[in-house]
Structure formats: C-alpha cells, structure tokens
Image: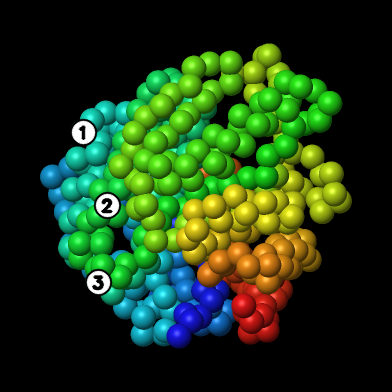
Amino acid sequence: MKEPFLWGVATSAFQLEGSPHADWASWDSILTQAPQVTHHYDLYKKDLQLLKELGVNAYRFSIEWSRIQPHESQWNEEAVTHYQEIIDILKANDIEPIVTIHHFTHPLWFIRKYPWHTKASVEKFLFFAEKLLASIKNVRYWITFNEPYVLVLGGYLEGCMPPGLRDVSLAVTALQNILTCHGKAYDAIHARDPGAMVSVAHNMAALAPWKRWNPLDRLLARIAKYFYNHSLLDAFLTGHLQVRFPFGRTYHISVPVKNKLDFFGVNYYTRIHIRFNPLKKMGVELRHHDIEGYGLTDMGWEIHPHGLEKVLRYASKLNLPIIITENGIATRNDRKKIRFMKGHIDVLERCIKNGMDVRGFFYWSLIDNYEWLRGLDARFGLYRVDFSSLERIPTKAALYYSYLIKSRRF
C-alpha cells in the first residue's frame, strides 16, 4: 500500500528554544537579549498542539546537541527525555516525526576544541550521534545534517558562522569530515533499524548568470550550479566529491557516502543571480532581482516558484524518493505568504503529475523563529510570535496551508 504524502512543517531546536551552551549563543548579540528565543523548550506542548490545528501528518524538528552534551564529559538525560517526549506526543497524534540530528549549532566546547576541519571532529560527533540513537525510540525518518554546504560556506569561507574561518583548504577538509559523519551515522541508524529512512537536507537554489551576455557571469553561474546543487548528488552516486572554486584549484576527495541515502531532502527558497565582481571574494557576487514580478521576501530573496521544478529535476537523478524538507517565506504580509505557498505547491503538483517521486512537503516554519544573523524580524511562521508576550497568533497563511493539506491529493 502506498504511504500517505507527508504534509508537514519544519523547525530547528535552537531557532525556537536557544541554548546557553551552544556556539551561536555567544556568536550573535541578539541572543543575549532573547536567550530562550520563543521559549519553545518550555512551551513545546502548546506548540505541538498547533500541528493538530493545521492537520499535518508529519513534523520535522531537530535535537539540540548542546543541551544533551553541554560539556564534553556531561550527558544530560533530562534533555534526551524531553526530546523523546516530543516524539511520543507526535506519535500519539499520528504525526510522523522527522528528526534532524545536526542543524547548524554545536556545543561551545566542540567548536572551540574540535571544529570540523580537525580529525577529532568525526569521533566527537559520532559519539554523540550513536549514544543519541541508543536512547531515542520510535523514529523512522532521520536527517543527519541540515544544509552541510551552507554550514561550510558560512563557517569556513564567509566566516559569518562558527567557527568563523576563511580558508578554502580547511573548508574542503571540514566538508569531507561532515560527509564522513553522515556515512557512518547512516550505517549506525540502519544497524538499529534496517527499515529507517535516512538523508541529509540539501539547500538547493535556482542559479543563473546576472548578465547572460557576459561570459564571466555565465562561467561563474555554471561553476556555482555544479558545486552548490550537483556535487553533493554526485558524491552520493559515486563516493567521490569534486569541489571546484572559481579561478582556483579543483579538489577531488573520497567520501564514504555512496548509496547511503534512503530519500533525498531538498530545501528550496529562491533563485540567485551570479555576477563577476573582481572586488568580491573569488570574484563572485550574489544578487537577487525581482525579474518575474513575484517580489522579494523580507530577507531580500527573489520569489521564484519555477525554480523548485528545476532543483527537483536535478535531485531526481538520484532515483530516490524526494521530500521537500523546507520551503517558506519571510514576510509580515499574509497575502504574500499565501501567494508564495500557492505558487510553490502548484509547481509541486505539476512535478508529481509529470512523474517526479516527491513524497512530502514541509513548510518553514511552524512559528516565527530566530533567523541566523537576522535576529527575530524574519517572520517565516505560520503562527506569528509576539516576542514580548510569547503569544502564538494564527495567520491567514496557516488557515490556507490547512486548506491545502485537506484539499490536495498527491
């Protein structure tokens, strides 16, 4: 019997609940003013009730590593019990839990002593993952890493995320170690549950040259498209990762991830135009432009529903089920949010009718959250959060998403 399409919403632990022991807690000053963000760690039962209001049958959330292992030698069983209770509540309400093990944040001790470019990072992460897997029950769907490329680009090339480095060779080593951890975590999960569904959530974008007549813009767009969208797919198909940087060397590395996916998670938000600019790092400038009249989000990102079809087509070469693990818009305008949602779901429906094996769609996010380096003003939530009273206020977009769930038949 065919399994039901997974209609859900996605969140990450730190973006809702914060953590005093996480690297990001001291990275961004806004978190000293709102260290518990939405207070989701205490209000989780109230927030999970919102899932029933929406009518979703799946919920993607993450487990905050720094709460469970706040110090290298400490394991917080109370925190493990907390996340298990979330899973139990979901299962009791016939909502499938999709659990992300790593969603950008680390314990401060890890990022200071064993960042991803060190050999010890693999051992330290796998200790956490394997001990967690021994404790957490009744989870079928696992995502090992959320957006590993964004983690490496931000942490090792732009320096805007922990560990805040700008070194190409360290970035490649970090990426190799992260993918090694995925491969080993995949094996550990399947050793415990042969029927588990395991993936990563890969952020993909529609990429295009800023000026199509400019050969340098076209070259950079082609390099960026391969690296950002395709190189990870090839690594899962071949066990070989090719990383090419503009006007620099090409790295060839082996990664133990060949065929270590049971589905593929796609995060899609926007189209990005690539422009050659000699004043920018590696000569690359990223730009957003409202070409088709859909507008820009409050993050300044172009709204481009048709790009979803492009990235799903790219992902289809894996010949695996696809789940759209994130898709959403930052805006305070409900009509704009509904239009965004409708545009992307219409594209999704067309893709499924054309034979693409898409098994789920997760809107980001359930409630407003902390957005990396953008504070609390990027309003992604279906439920608006009043950060002074902590009230969760349903938006018209929440009603519309509930309607979509009830009316669409994929």
Name the residue rendered at 46%, 70% in the picture.
Answer: 59
The label number, if any, that marks residue 120 in the structure image: 1
First reached walking from the N terminus: tag 3 or tag 2: 3
From the image, state whether disc 2 or disc 1 is nearer to you. 2
First reached walking from the N terminus: tag 3 or tag 1: 1
Q: Which residue is mark 2?
A: 185
Q: Which residue is mark 3?
A: 137
Name the residue rendered at 32%, 67% in the picture.
Answer: 196
Q: Are marks 2 and 1 in contact (CB under 8 Å)?
A: no
In the drawing, does residue 42 fall left or right of residue 181?
A: right
Q: Is residue 180 above or below residue 253?
A: below
- What's the CA distance linking mark 3 and mark 1? 28 Å
- Mark 3 neighbour density, 10 Å: few (under 14) some (14–19) many (20 or more): few
Please indicate, yes or no, whether residue 35 appears anywhere in the rendered image.
no
Please indicate, yes or no, whether residue 83 appears anywhere in the rendered image.
yes
**Amino acid type, residue under disc 1 in the picture:** Ala
In the drawing, does residue 128 fall left or right of residue 54?
A: left
- Mark 2 neighbour density, 10 Å: few (under 14) some (14–19) many (20 or more): many
